[in-house]
Amino acid sequence: MKPKIIIVGASSTGAQLVKRLVNEWEITVIDSNSEALASTDFEAVTLRVVGDATSALILREAEAQFSRAMVACTDSDEVNLEALRVGARDYDIDERFAVMRDTSFQDAYADNGVELVNRTHACAALLASLIRGGRRVATNIGLGQGEIMEVEVLPNSSVIGCRLADLHPRRWLVGAVYRDGRLIVPHGDTRLQPGDRVVIVGDPEILPLIATHIGAGESKFPLHYGSKLGMVGTDLKDDALDELRFLVNHTEATGLQILHREKELPRSLVDKLEARQMSYSAETIAEANDSQLASAASARDVGILAVDPRPLSFWHAIGIGRSPTIELISKTLSPVLLPRGTYPYLKVLICLAELPFDLEAARLAVDLVRMINAELHLVTVQQPELVAGTQLRSELEEKCEAIEALARMYQVTIKKHVVTGNPIREIVKLSGDYGLVVLPYKRNRRSFLTNPDVGQNLIHRVKSSVMIMPH
């Protein structure tokens, strides 16, 4: 036997609903207008009841006591709400749905446990998808706000060739890829191609921006890492806070997330944030060290994690152990910023000083310069061949070509510099001419007295702000 459902309202919406449900449900339609019920649109229903659906007697005549679900789609939110309320109270109908006309009734529907279709939002979402072109929106999925979108990867999109894992999805994910008429079930190593239709699922607040990034390759930095800037502790200096405000104002970052140990934020910090008109939220994680706070940030919606730039000790510099900052970097998945106040980033430098070099650091730099309209420079440090060997120099050149190709794919001009000498000394010397240095850093890397950690030295010693991409 088919389950029974009551549709309140013999409107055009009700008629369309009958067409879609008639093969799966036994349908009763209630309306006070007998002429509307007499329409051929309702010939397939099991029972047609003329009367007021807010009456318990009319609902009994409509066999509400045997019905599993109830839908209200009249032109009156008052009628819809009352009919569904009576259905729940007198006949224990738990599955109840409504088409909402007036958003002022949203809370009342929610208080009565009614699932909603917001007519205005649904129409607007569908119209927007037509206007934008290349996108389709599924409305009223999940929270009812359109959390599924389908977007086409255009030929000039900068995500072409990227692994899905390299897009670092946060608050969204790729649910399916359609290519040449067939479904590809995606995984982290799936690479997108021109013409792919990509189904993305996630938070409706950021989903349109992610769709734009995937479809046309527009920069939405740092959204594919997370929508907020993160801050570990409460010790950042004034110029560092100004730098974070610069990033909030010039990227898609939505505000500041502060993770700290205190019971509440120091009043002095609150005053500074309010003076800078920065949107922020704070979370106390008691008795946590900086590394634990950084690890916690990875579970939040943090796209860039800012930490206090501290000097490097003598022992760490010569390769004995790892600095607390490096320990912190190894605990997070997001890019880490050591802000030294050298904003605005008029010139951004990618440093290719050693191998392995993870291309995600270069992709981060390219994405950022597109967002803030900065110059991008690449420096390759070649040690003398007697020290480095021919093979290492060849591999550095290959990686340099890969970085240049990546920049071309994003239509970004990159200025290349080649220097010879000690990588740490040469890059520290150059860094004073740049607003930001971008470096990769391999997590859990070991440092030895005979082979000091180049990355650790650079992170602490460059003169500009530095953004690190852990890998």
Image (cartoon, rainbow, N blue to C red):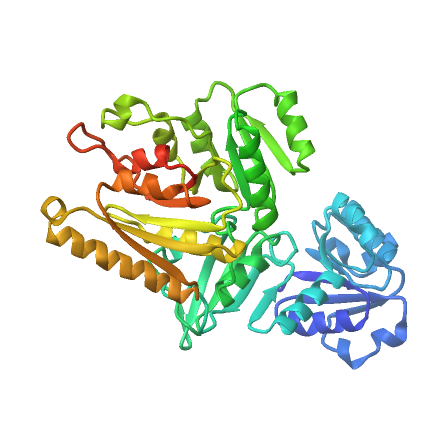
Give the x, y percent position of residue 345.
49, 47
Q: Is residue 247 left or right of residue 460?
A: right
Say which of 127 and 36 sits in front: 127
Say which of 8 and 253 sits in front: 253
Q: Is residue 243 at all visible to an observer of this figure?
A: yes
Q: In the rendered view, would you say 340 is above or below 98?
A: above
**Residue sitting at 39 percent across and 60 percent down?**
414
Give the x, y percent position of residue 375.
45, 56
Give the x, y percent position of residue 419.
26, 50
Q: Is residue 347 left or right of residue 418?
A: right
Q: Is residue 469 at all visible to an observer of this figure?
A: no
Say which of 69 and 14 sits in front: 14
Q: Quadrant of residue 245?
A: top right
**Residue sitting at 22 percent across and 54 percent down?**
396
Q: In the rendered view, would you say 363 is above or below 183?
A: above
Q: Quadrant of the N terminus?
A: bottom right
Q: In the rendered view, would you say 40 is above or below 326?
A: below
**Residue sitting at 78 percent across and 67 percent down?**
29
Q: Quadrant of the C terminus?
A: top left
Q: Is residue 395 left or right of residue 223?
A: left
